[in-house]
Image (cartoon, rainbow, N blue to C red):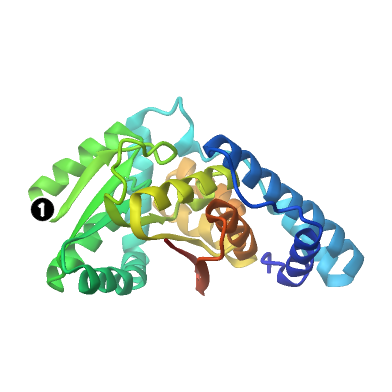
C-alpha cells in the first residue's frame, strides 16, 4: 500500500508518451526545478489515473494524498539549537542500534565496497552524506577493519556540532573514519573522483525531489562508482510503525519527527523519476529490502 504501482506505471507511461520528462539540464538550479516539476506532474497524472480506475485504486490514492506531507522535520528547523539537534540524531542512533538496522545497511553496502577494492587495488573511499551522529559511519568502519578491507569512511553533515562530536569519538576509537563539514547541495570543494561510493541512509525523505536530484548529480561528479540511498519503504505499516517505535525514546519531538518522516518516504516510482532526471539515463536500480527502499545509481 502507498506504492500505488498499477496507477503509477500507467501515469508514468502517459507522461513519457507525451514528452513531459525532457532530459538534460543547464545547471543545478535548472535540475532542481525540473525534478520538482516532474514529480509534481507525476502526482497529478497518477491522481487522474486512479480516479479513472476507480474502486480500491481511487481509495488508495485518496489515502496517500491524505497522508503525504511536505512539512519539515523539527530536527531540520534552522532555529533549533545544535544541542537539541544532536540529542535527536543520537536518539535515532540508539533506535537504529536497538533495531539492528546498521548491520542490514552494511550488508547492502559491503558487496559494492568489496567490488571496488578488488577492481581498484587500493583504499576504497566512502563518503556518507547527512551522517548525523555517525552511527552508520562508525559501524561501517568497524566492519571493514574486522574484514580486513582497505577502506576509509568520511562522514559529512552541514551541522558543525555533529562534526565536532563525531571527530572526537573517532579519535578515541582509532577507526578509519573522519567527519567533515559538507553541504550536499554544493560539493564544489571536493575533487573530481575524490570518492568511490557516496552513501545516504535514512535521509532521502528530508529533501525535496529537486534537492535529491541535485545531490545525486553532484555525487556523480565526485564519485567514481555509485550513489546508494537507503530509506524507509513507503507503506501504511511504516506510516504507523515508525512514530510508534520512535515514541519508545520518550522524546516528544523525536516521535513527531518519526511521524513526519514516515509520511514523506518516497515511493519507488518517485525515486525512479528523480534518478533518471538527475543522471539523464537509466543507470540505477531499486530494491525493496523490507522495510527499506534501496536506490543504487551507478556512474
Q: Identify whether 17 is placed above or below 157.
A: below
Q: Position of residue 175 (x, y in %)?
A: 12, 56
The residue sitting at 27% across, 48% down in the picture is 155
**Which is nearer the eye, 230 or 214?**
214
* Quarter residue 30 falls in: top right
Q: Image check: 259 left or right of 109?
A: right
Q: Image check: 229 left or right of 280?
A: left
**Which is nearer the eye, 297 or 95?**
297
Q: Image check: 21 left or right of 85?
A: right
Q: Identify whether 165 is placed above or below 6.
A: above
- Residue that carries the numbered disc 1 in the rendered image: 173
The residue sitting at 75% across, 61% down in the picture is 16
Quadrant where the C terminus is found in the figure: bottom left
The residue sitting at 24% across, 72% down in the picture is 119
Quadrant where the N terminus is found in the figure: bottom right
How many numbered marks, from 0 up?
1
Q: Position of residue 127 (x, y in %)?
A: 30, 52
Q: Position of residue 163 (x, y in %)?
A: 25, 38
Q: Position of residue 63 (x, y in %)?
A: 76, 59
Count residues near mark 1 (Cα–Cα under 10 Å), then give few for <14, some for 14-19, many for 20+: few
SS assignment at label 1: helix
Amino acid at each position: 500500500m502507498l506504492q500505488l504501482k498499477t496507477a503509477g506505471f500507467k501515469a508514468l507511461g502517459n507522461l513519457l508518451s507525451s514528452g513531459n520528462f525532457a532530459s538534460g539540464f543547464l545547471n543545478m538550479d535548472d535540475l532542481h526545478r525540473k525534478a520538482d516539476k516532474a514529480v509534481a506532474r507525476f502526482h497529478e497524472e497518477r491522481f487522474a489515473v486512479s480516479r479513472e480506475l476507480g474502486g480500491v485504486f481511487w481509495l488508495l490514492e485518496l489515502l496517500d494524498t491524505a497522508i503525504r506531507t511536505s512539512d519539515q522535520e523539527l530536527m531540520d528547523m534552522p532555529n533549533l539549537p545544535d544541542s537539541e539537534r544532536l540529542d535527536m540524531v543520537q536518539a535515532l542512533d540508539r533506535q537504529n542500534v536497538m533495531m539492528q538496522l546498521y548491520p542490514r545497511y552494511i550488508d547492502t553496502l559491503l558487496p559494492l565496497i568489496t567490488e571496488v577494492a578488488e577492481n581498484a587495488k587500493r583504499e576504497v573511499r566512502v563518503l556518507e552524506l547527512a551522517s548525523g551522529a555517525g552511527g552508520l559511519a562508525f559501524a561501517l568502519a568497524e566492519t571493514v577493519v574486522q574484514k580486513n578491507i582497505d577502506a576509509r569512511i568520511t562522514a559529512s553533515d552541514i551541522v558543525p556540532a555533529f562534526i565536532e562530536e563525531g571527530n572526537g569519538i573517532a579519535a578515541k576509537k582509532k577507526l578509519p573514519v573522519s567527519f567533515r563539514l559538507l553541504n550536499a547541495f554544493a560539493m564544489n570543494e571536493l575533487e573530481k573522483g575524490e570518492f568511490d561510493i557516496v552513501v545516504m541512509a535514512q535521509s532521502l525523505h528530508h529533501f525535496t525531489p529537486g534537492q535529491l536530484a541535485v545531490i545525486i548529480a553532484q555525487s556523480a561528479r565526485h564519485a567514481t562508482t555509485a550513489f546508494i540511498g537507503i530509506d524507509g519503504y513507503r507503506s501504511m505499516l511504516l506510516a504507523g510503525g515508525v512514530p510508534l517505535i520512535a515514541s519508545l525514546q520518550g522524546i516528544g519531538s523525536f516521535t513527531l519527527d518519526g511521524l513526519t518522516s514516515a509520511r514523506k518516504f518516497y515511493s519507488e516510482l518517485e525515486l525512479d523519476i528523480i534518478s533518471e532526471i538527475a543522471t539523464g539515463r537509466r543507470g540505477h536500480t531499486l530494491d525493496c529490502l523490507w522495510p527499506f527502499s534501496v536506490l543504487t545509481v551507478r556512474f
